Amino acid sequence: MTGLINTILPFFGLILLGFLAGRFLKHEENGLIWLNRFVIYAALPPLIFQIIRKAPQEGLLNLPYFLGTALGTGSIFIGSALLLYLLYKSSIKTMALQGATASYGNIGYIGLPLCVGIFGAEAAVPAVLVFCFDNTLQFVFVPFLTALGSNTTESKWKIARRIILGIILHPFILATIAGLIFLFANITLPQAADNLLSMLERAAGPCALFALGVTVSQQSAIKFQSEYLILIIAKLFVHPLLTFLILSYIGGFDKVWMGVALLMASLPTASNVFVMASDYNTYKTGSSNCILISTALSFFTIMALLIAIETNSIPQNLFGY
């Protein structure tokens, strides 16, 4: 218990430091923009690249694992979007952002560094698998639905082309592709390049968590609505439960891989959801409030989940095979 607290507190401590800095220190808006750009373009891609190129090849070919985790995320997205449409008659564009709010966890800023910090280096491969395929799902679902719900004159081909290019050219996806090429082609980096990437890799976690705290601090004051409760319950509770049921049904995953999947599924709503909401000028207040509330609550829910994993309270084979 003490070990878990000592491991997890620094992660949320960095978020808190960022939050306090955002609230009480004067800063230019451009400063946060450039900090987030550093994380997205300069820090997290080297982390992903280094993890993948050094990973065992057989681990990255675990098709049942990433299909199972992607099915869990996709089901939460679709299920939450449809439920809120039935209850609140949300527009298609709003449904897209509500689905992302309920299913898109902070798998980059919190997930990757936290998984490695909790479960060790062997957690890197399953964490990257979840990270890449969950991101891909969101980059497909949200642009597609927002385009479908917009009064746009773009042809279907142009919409499809924009979505495909957005996926392929995203720095996280490019880093994944590069890592796979270096891994399977057995390419060795020059020592100077490896040292540079290692420096950026070590900066990814602290900078990402601090940037998350600053981003959360800039959100508007909480204006609670009943729909937020549905989205937060879906994100913090239903998502990990559904992921557990799917992976347990598939079977064959060890404690670390199962733990990584559950931890990634239990993360609070990603700050990227607010970025997408701002880009599409849809559901900005709802997404920002859910990010703020779910991030605060997630300290307790994640701690409870990790205690359950550490004490072997979660069965590996729920269905007995």
Image (cartoon, rainbow, N blue to C red):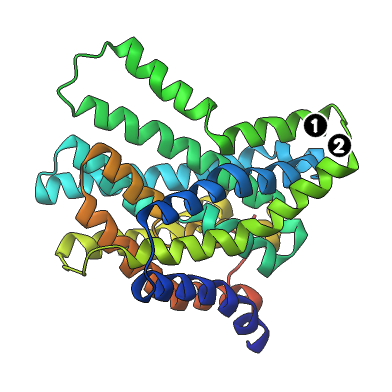
From the top left corner, tell me how far across and down residue 288 is, in percent: 28, 58
Residue 183, quarter of picture: top right
Q: Can residue 251 be seen in this view?
A: no
The residue under label 1 is which amino acid type?
Answer: Phe
Image vertical order of residue 217 relative to residue 86, above or below: below
From the top left corner, tell me how far across and down residue 200 is, in percent: 69, 51
- Label 1–label 2 contact, CB within 8 A: yes
The extreme bottom residue here reads 2
80 displayed left or right of 195:
left
Q: Is mark 1 on a helix, strand or loop?
A: helix
Please report whichever mark, 1 or 2, sits nearer to the chain's N-terminal start: 1
Q: In the drawing, what numbered circle is on residue 182? A: 1
Image vertical order of residue 231 relative to residue 70, above or below: below
- Residue at image position (45%, 61%) is 212
Q: Name the residue under label 2.
A: 189
The residue under label 2 is which amino acid type?
Answer: Leu
Seen from the viewer's position, the closer of residues 240 and 94 is 94
